[in-house]
Amino acid sequence: MNPMLSHLCAALLLAAPALVLTTSHGTEPPAEPASHASHDAHAAHAPGETPAEAEAPAVRWQADEPLARGMKRVRAATQALSHGAHGHLAADQVKAIAAELDAAVQDMIAQCRLEPEPDAALHPLLARVLQASALLADGEFDAAAMADLEAVLARYPVLFEDAAWSADHSDSA
């Protein structure tokens, strides 16, 4: 990462708590949205800490291709992780799932082209996926990480219209 981008990310991480406090107390957020470098703030959330979930839009936002592809990867990794609840995954398999979750989020962040409002609604979901990935990185199955991932998978179609998500999900039912 270039030094300029590193400084921008650090500044955004330092400013994020102030923005959350400002927004949660009813005042208007800044008129100009931060650049997509603000996605790096996802990693700043402590495990177990979940930012306030955005209210579901009256009409779901359209998922773009990078988002749809990334969330499909998150769902596949979560399905693979579900075997860990029964002790059917070795530590290296759990680590590989954690790496896949992290890679899926990093790809979504790198390719994000969403408008500011759906982008902001997506942030808490991606933060939870990164938290779950961090909990699984040591190779141990973690029921809380699994629950967070399942919550993300349930919340995503409430916020976003993704025809492939619905079609894929009905095939597996």
Image (cartoon, rainbow, N blue to C red):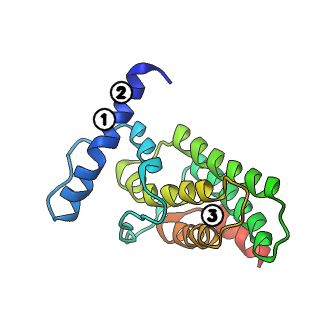
* Mark 2 → mark 3, Cα distance in angstroms: 38 Å
3 and 1 marks in contact (CB < 8 Å) = no
Which of the two residues, 173 or 25, is positioned nearer the viewer here?
25
In this view of the protein, which residue sits in the foreground, 168 or 109?
109
Of the two numbered discs 3 and 1 on the same chain, state the one appearing first in sequence: 1
- Measure the alpha-carbon separation of dots 3 and 1: 37 Å
Report the residue marked by disc 2. Answer: 7
Q: Earlier in the sequence, mark 2 or mark 3?
A: 2
Front one among 114 and 151: 151
Q: Measured from the top left, where is residue 141 in percent x and y?
A: 71, 66
Amino acid, disc 1: Ala
Numbered disc 2: secondary structure: helix
Q: Secondary structure at mark 3?
A: helix
Compared with 114, 151 (above or below) is below
For badge 2, the amino acid type reads: His
Indicate which label's residue lies in the foreground, 2 or 3: 2
Disc marking residue 163: 3
For disc 3, the neighbor class at 10 Å (few under 14, some 14 to 19, many from 20) is few
Question: Residue 90 vs residue 159: left or right?
Answer: right
Label 1 belongs to which residue?
A: 11
In space, the residues marked 1 and 2 are separated at their CA atoms by 6 Å
User: Residue lying farthest bottom?
Assistant: 173
Q: Mark 3 belongs to which amino acid? A: Ala
Measuring from the top left, give residue 123's x and y in whole percent.
Answer: 44, 55
Is there a contact, CB below 8 Å, between mark 1 and mark 2?
A: yes
Label 3 near label 2: C-beta < 8 Å?
Answer: no
The image quadrant that residue 49 belongs to is: bottom left
